[in-house]
């Protein structure tokens, strides 16, 4: 990052109301996340209307805390960044309109950031990014393999054709009557079983794409069949079987892509990269391949605004600017901002 | 005293700046555009028109609902963020009352309503120059509203763009007691919003931070969840 800059970043794409201040794209000056999990647990998942209502309630408090923790006045900032998409449109709109009002009030430029670019750039807050770089983005809404040749360059080489990995985790958790969010519970149960039920793996031939809906159906069918025979399923073994399938496919494809594109660094990003089973598998695989592999700390894997600020710093240096007519973009495509 | 008023509660958008009670500039837009795209550029444009900076505003008025959930959230988010970060007072006013006050010179009851789908409405009934509430804003079926209005045995002037949807059933229930405002009085005007806001006390900064729209309805998932809780 050639220029010194201080960016206030805001993220409200799902159920976390978050704000952060980032210096030069690599230093977290403050990082505030207000989670709605306690409220959303009642519904067994994120209800968009409820998420939007919580965001309006918390938004200025969260921004104020980020500024206070950073001990900064708005005038000292260089730009305001906000998640423009993808995400829940009603939720995105709260962050976007707060960001626009704040930027306008203080005459600051505004930068609209892609949520996945944010997840990838969470790594810039931990160590410098080396290119070419391969990012495995796994969360409740995304499962993507992204190749980066330089800062601000993105090429999606594979993505899910149906459910995101995190979505499959949540659905299988529901089948096993585990509380929301289900991912951590499945991860925990999977480690309690020595043997897992054997579930299929969706390889999709040579493609780097993913598919998890068949696996999810296989788990549901397995449970039904067992119940029809009057037998009980062992949740630990189902959890392990499911997780083994997800982890093996993710790891195998990521390793294959890393080798094909001869990347210097592999990173995992997104909420599901906090999963112990997945982390361990990727760490072991890349240790064997002698390719540096990194996962950001847990608080930077889940949705946060620090990562949005990190991505925005690269955009700021590339002179990317938004304007006051920015809208929520729920299906936003990941586009490069590098000049090439 | 310089006020900025913002109403994004339904399809129309209205923004105004007033000084010492007099209009400096006002816009009423009644085209189907996303408030998220238009509201901030309009605010910027109007301030530029009157040659003012954001910090020149002394107080902010916002229509707080009911209305389109997303619509009111956009207005409220912009208003509360500006108020908080510029350290200015914020006053919320019922979006039904804002439209009712277009007819505040009418000598009688003014009923303001928005369509809430499936024969439901958001409605409020007011009277007099200061728009004293006769029936507080609420969410109900159109028939319940009209039954309540009939009991008041007075002429009622209906205002709001959605009134036309219910014109027949209104006439059926109230007959000659039902009066309908001309179309030009059916859109929210931010100057009327400011007029009503100026009569209310300012909120503390804590209240500004905690400010949320008045939806007058639970989110569906929440309503269902509460029903489940009662069953158990």
Image: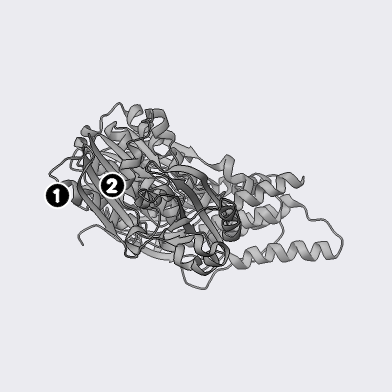
- Name the disc covering residue B49, or none: 1
User: Which residue is at 31% across, 41% downward?
Assistant: B195
Q: Nearer the viewer, residue B114 or A38?
A: B114
Disc 1 vs disc 2: Cβ atoms closer than 8 Å?
Answer: no
Q: Nearer the viewer, residue A316 or A236?
A: A316
Are marks 1 and 2 in one subunit?
Answer: yes
Residue A293 visible somewhere in the drawing: no
Q: Look at the numbered disc 2 and give the secondary structure of its residue.
A: helix
Q: Which residue is mark 2?
A: B191
Image coordinates of residue A140 in percent, x first then y, are 52, 54
Viewer-nearest of labels 1 and 2? 2
Residue A104 to residue A240: above or below:
above
Residue A177 visible somewhere in the drawing: yes
Using the image, name the chain to which the residue with label 1 belongs: B
* Quarter in which the N terminus of chain A is drawn: top left
Q: Residue most toward the bottom?
A: A205
Residue B211 sits in quarter: top left
User: Which residue is at 47% across, 58% downward?
Assistant: B114
Coloration of the structure image: one colour
Residue B147 sits in quarter: bottom right
**With B210 as the anchor, is A200 left or right in this view?**
right
Q: Residue most toward the left?
A: B51
Using the image, name the chain to which the residue with label 2 belongs: B
Image coordinates of residue B91 in percent, x first then y, are 36, 37
Image coordinates of residue B173 in percent, x first then y, are 57, 63
Image coordinates of residue B50 in percent, x first then y, are 14, 46
**With A167 as the anchor, is B26 left or right in this view?**
left
**Mark-to-mark CA distance, 1 and 2:** 16 Å
């Amino acid at each position: 990052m050639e220029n010194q800059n201080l960016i206030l970043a805001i993220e409200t794409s799902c159920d976390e109301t978050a704000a952060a201040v980032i210096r030069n794209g690599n230093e977290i000056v403050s990082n505030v996340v207000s989670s709605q999990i306690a409220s959303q647990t009642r519904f067994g998942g994120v209800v968009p209307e409820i998420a939007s209502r919580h965001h309006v309630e918390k938004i200025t408090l969260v921004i104020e805390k980020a500024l206070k923790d950073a001990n900064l006045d708005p005038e000292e900032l260089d730009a305001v960044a906000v998640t423009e998409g993808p995400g829940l449109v009603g939720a995105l709109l709260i962050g976007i309109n707060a960001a626009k009002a704040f930027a306008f009030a203080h005459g600051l430029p505004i930068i609209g950031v892609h949520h996945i670019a944010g997840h990838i750039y969470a790594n810039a807050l931990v160590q410098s990014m080396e290119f070419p770089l391969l990012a495995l983005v796994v969360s409740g809404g995304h499962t993507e393999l992204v190749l980066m040749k330089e800062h601000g360059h993105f090429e999606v080489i594979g993505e899910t054709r149906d459910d995101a990995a995190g979505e499959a985790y949540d659905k299988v958790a529901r089948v096993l009557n585990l509380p929301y969010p289900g991912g951590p519970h499945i991860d925990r149960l999977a480690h309690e079983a020595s043997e897992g039920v054997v579930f299929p793996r969706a390889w999709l031939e040579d493609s780097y794409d993913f598919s998890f809906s068949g696996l999810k159906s296989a788990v549901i069918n397995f449970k039904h069949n067992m119940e029809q025979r009057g037998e009980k399923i062992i949740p630990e073994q189902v959890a392990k079987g499911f997780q083994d399938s997800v982890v093996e496919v993710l790891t195998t494809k990521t390793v294959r892509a890393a080798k094909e594109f001869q990347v210097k660094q592999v990173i995992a990003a997104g909420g599901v990269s906090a999963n112990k089973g997945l982390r361990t598998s990727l760490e072991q695989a890349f240790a064997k391949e002698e390719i540096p592999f990194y996962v950001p700390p847990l608080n930077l894997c889940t949705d946060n605004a620090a990562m949005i600020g990190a991505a925005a710093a690269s955009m700021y240096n590339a002179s990317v600017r938004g304007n006051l007519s920015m809208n929520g973009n729920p299906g936003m495509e990941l586009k490069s901002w590098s000049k090439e | 005293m310089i006020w900025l008023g913002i109403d994004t509660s339904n399809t129309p958008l209205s923004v105004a700046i007033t000084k010492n009670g007099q209009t400096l500039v006002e816009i009423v837009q009644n085209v189907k555009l996303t408030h998220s795209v238009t509201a901030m550029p309009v605010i910027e444009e109007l301030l530029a028109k009157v040659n003012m900076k954001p910090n020149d505003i002394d107080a902010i008025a916002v229509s707080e609902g009911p209305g389109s959930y997303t619509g009111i959230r956009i207005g409220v988010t912009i208003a509360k963020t500006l108020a908080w970060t510029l350290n200015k007072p914020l006053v919320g006013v019922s979006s039904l009352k804002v439209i009712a006050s277009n007819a505040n010179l009418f000598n009688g009851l003014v009923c303001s309503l928005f369509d809430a789908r499936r024969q439901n409405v958001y409605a409020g009934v007011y009277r007099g120059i200061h728009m004293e509430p006769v029936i507080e804003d609420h969410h109900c079926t159109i028939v319940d509203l009209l039954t309540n209005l009939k009991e008041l045995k007075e002429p009622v002037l209906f205002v709001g763009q959605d009134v036309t949807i219910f014109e027949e059933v209104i006439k059926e229930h109230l007959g000659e007691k039902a009066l309908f405002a001309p179309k030009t009085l059916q859109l929210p005007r931010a100057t009327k919003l400011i007029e009503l806001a100026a009569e209310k006390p300012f909120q503390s900064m804590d209240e500004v931070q905690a400010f949320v729209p008045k939806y007058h309805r639970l989110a569906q998932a929440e309503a269902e969840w509460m029903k489940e809780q009662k069953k158990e």
